[in-house]
Image: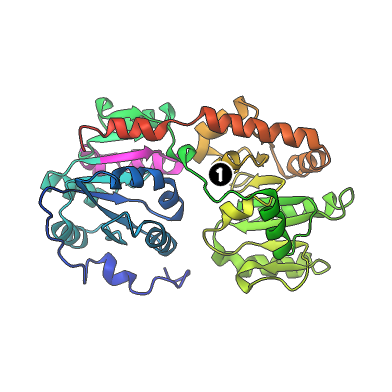
Amino acid sequence: MKRRGDYQGAIAMRMGIGVEEWPRTEGKRRIWIQAVSLGEILVIERFIRELAARPDTEILLTTTTSTGLKMAREKYSDLCDRITYFPMDFWPFSKRFWKRMRPDLAICAETELWPEHMKQASLVGSPMVLINGRLSDKSFRYARRLSFLFGRHLRCIDQVLAISEHDAARFREIGIPAERVSVTGNLKVDVDIDERFDERERAHLKQSLGLGDGFVLLGSSTWPGEEATLLRALRALRESLPDSRLMLVPRHAERRGEIRDMLVKEASDLRWHFKSEGPPETEVDILVGDTSGELRALTQLADLAFIGKSLPPHREGQTPIECGLLGVPLLFGPGMSNFRSVRDGMLESGAAELVQDEEALISRILSLAVDGPALEALSNRQRDWAENSRGSLERTLEALGHFL
């Protein structure tokens, strides 16, 4: 919170201070949905719309991050009855929040397994369901190590709807009864992307951002070390495609100072611009997308994308799903453990390519950038993968039927 500097008033809200009691509405079933951050808020859009369409339902939506709260209020104010921060997971704060909100059903998205939250649900008799459930390697190790402490809390979960059989097995292993775990698929693949650009809109946005009309390489949700690798790729790429440009979209916008230092040191001969500083005055060689919630738009300007946090020493990976839904050809490194099922599906269908290290990444960027038919084939296979992977929303709603 200190690092981001945009959590004004959040401490009090997360302690339950100033949270007014919410009187019950006769004939309404109250559902509390917790989605930790911006990414999860976007993922559950169709899910929220389906619930909001039920006349007997009122929705409380909470989130943990400031960017998540901002996006939730922008997108769902007309769908949700209350939107606020999730309380800190300590007994006095969680209990106070539960007492004032009094939900009939608690739904958490992806990895939101908070012990006190689960305990309070059990104490008041509210069912708790985890949707789009997954466990990263790190979370799985942590959960197994502390299972002697939190095992009884995990038994408070009434249902886990996992994104893959691999994740389902992990939930069973950490102590959730097998009969409460099922696989419904990944809601991220069922996201509707309405703001798709046509060719005219795409060209206009590229020009307004100083990207010209040449080949654009995207670093999607990059982590430390990967920006320098992509800078090397740009220099090599310009030997065959002189008008090539690079977009860097770091996973954490607050790293802009670190990225600026790298560019000052290693790209003093190039023109670069940070999107947070407004429109560039001239064309640029490198655009840094250091603003929140715009990756989806910027992705559509790319001819080829690299998915961040996937090259050694990173191991978890960032989501490749939006690139896939938008048909943008993509590469990622071997470290994609957080998206194992998506990675495997994309590789099996030929919708993405895996590179083992920095040199292999640069080499493949160079070969694909000058091979139009190969890029087009990757893009077409991405669209086929997206179409064949849908259906998780319907399965999730069906599994929740008796809770609703």
Q: In the depicted view, which residue is nearer to us: 221 or 225?
A: 221
Q: How is the image coloured?
A: rainbow
Magenta span: chief secondary structure: helix
Q: Residue at x 72, y 31 (%)?
A: 377
Residue 349 belongs to magenta span = no
Q: Estimate the x, y position of residue 181 in percent, counting from the top left.
A: 30, 29
Q: Estimate the x, y position of residue 51 in percent, counting from the top left.
A: 29, 44
Q: Answer above or below: position of 109 versus 352.
A: below
Q: Estimate the x, y position of residue 168 in percent, counting from the top left.
A: 37, 30
Magenta span covers which residues?
129-155
Q: Residue at x 80, y 43 (%)?
A: 369
Q: Answer above or below: position of 15 versus 313.
A: below
Q: In the depicted view, which residue is nearer to us: 233 or 245?
A: 245
| Quarter of the figure that contains the C terminus | top left
Quarter occupied by residue 96: bottom left
Q: Residue at x 37, y 32 (%)?
A: 394
Residue 147 belongs to magenta span = yes
Amino acid type, residue under disc 1 in the picture:
Glu
- In the image, is 383 to the left or to the right of 393? right
Q: Which residue is mark 1?
A: 322
| Quarter of the figure that contains the N terminus | bottom left
**Whether residue 342 can be seen here:** yes
Q: Answer above or below: position of 119 versus 349.
A: below
